[in-house]
Image (cartoon, grey):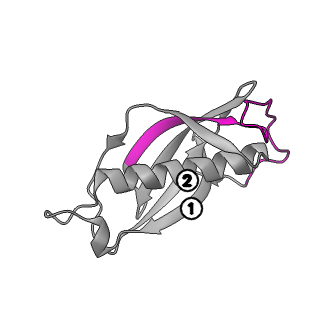
């Protein structure tokens, strides 16, 4: 059975993003993951304000080179009372380059955690 993936966003690796070996800096990728996670959390929950609570182990599978486009996709999330947790995948030409699990919490206008509900219907999925 294939896992459903939800497209989020994409980034292109630029010369300014790489180190001396020509590979994308891990810190740049982590920033991209955080941004993609926030976009997905907001889209799925319909909440305007979400904050990063946790990223688990970030596994870098393959280097990303200048000019390559990294597409970010999310796996079906688990929605809690105030949080949403899901895996994020980074792919270059359909090849997995990075994977992690993240958790975001929804905040009210005063910065306090608030209840979340999944948006119906959820964003479109990509079959894998």
Q: Residue at x 73, y 28 (%)?
A: 82
Q: Is residue 85 above or below residue 125?
A: above
Q: Residue at x 57, y 41 (%)?
A: 2
What percent of the width, then of the height, locates residue 4? 62, 44
Give the structural element (helix, strand or loop) at label 1: strand
| Mark positioned earlier in the residue sequence (1 or 2) | 1
Q: Mark 1 near mark 2, Cβ–Cβ under 8 Å? A: yes
What percent of the width, then of the height, locates residue 85? 61, 33
Residue at image mark 1: 9
Horizontal arrangement in the rendering, residue 15 relative to residue 118 (left or right): left
The answer, for residue 120, to whether it is visible in the render is yes
Give the structural element (helix, strand or loop) at label 2: helix
Check if residue 92 falls in the magenta segment.
no
Return the mark for residue 1: none
- Find the distance from the CA under tag 1 to the CA under tag 2: 6 Å
Horizontal arrangement in the rendering, residue 92 relative to residue 5 (left or right): left
Q: Residues within 10 Å of mark 2 (few under 14, many from 20)?
A: many
Magenta span: predominant SS is loop
Return the mark for residue 36: 2
What percent of the width, then of the height, locates residue 75? 58, 42
Q: Is residue 92 above or below residue 76?
A: below
What percent of the width, then of the height, locates residue 25? 28, 56
State the extent of the magenta-drawn residues as a range. 98-123
Horizontal arrangement in the rendering, residue 27 relative to residue 76 (left or right): left
Quarter of image, res 93: bottom left
């Amino acid at each position: 059975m294939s896992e459903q993936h939800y497209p989020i966003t994409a980034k292109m690796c630029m010369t300014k993003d790489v180190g001396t070996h020509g590979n994308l800096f891990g810190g740049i990728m982590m920033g991209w993951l955080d941004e993609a996670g926030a976009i997905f959390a907001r889209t799925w929950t319909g909440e305007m304000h979400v904050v990063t609570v946790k990223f688990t182990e970030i596994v870098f599978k393959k280097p990303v080179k200048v000019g390559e486009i990294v597409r970010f996709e999310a796996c079906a999330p688990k929605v809690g009372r105030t949080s949403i947790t899901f895996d994020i995948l980074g792919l270059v030409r359909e090849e997995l380059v990075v994977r992690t699990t993240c958790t975001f919490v929804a905040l009210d206008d005063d910065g306090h955690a608030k209840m979340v509900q999944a948006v119906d219907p959820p964003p479109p999925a990509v079959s894998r």
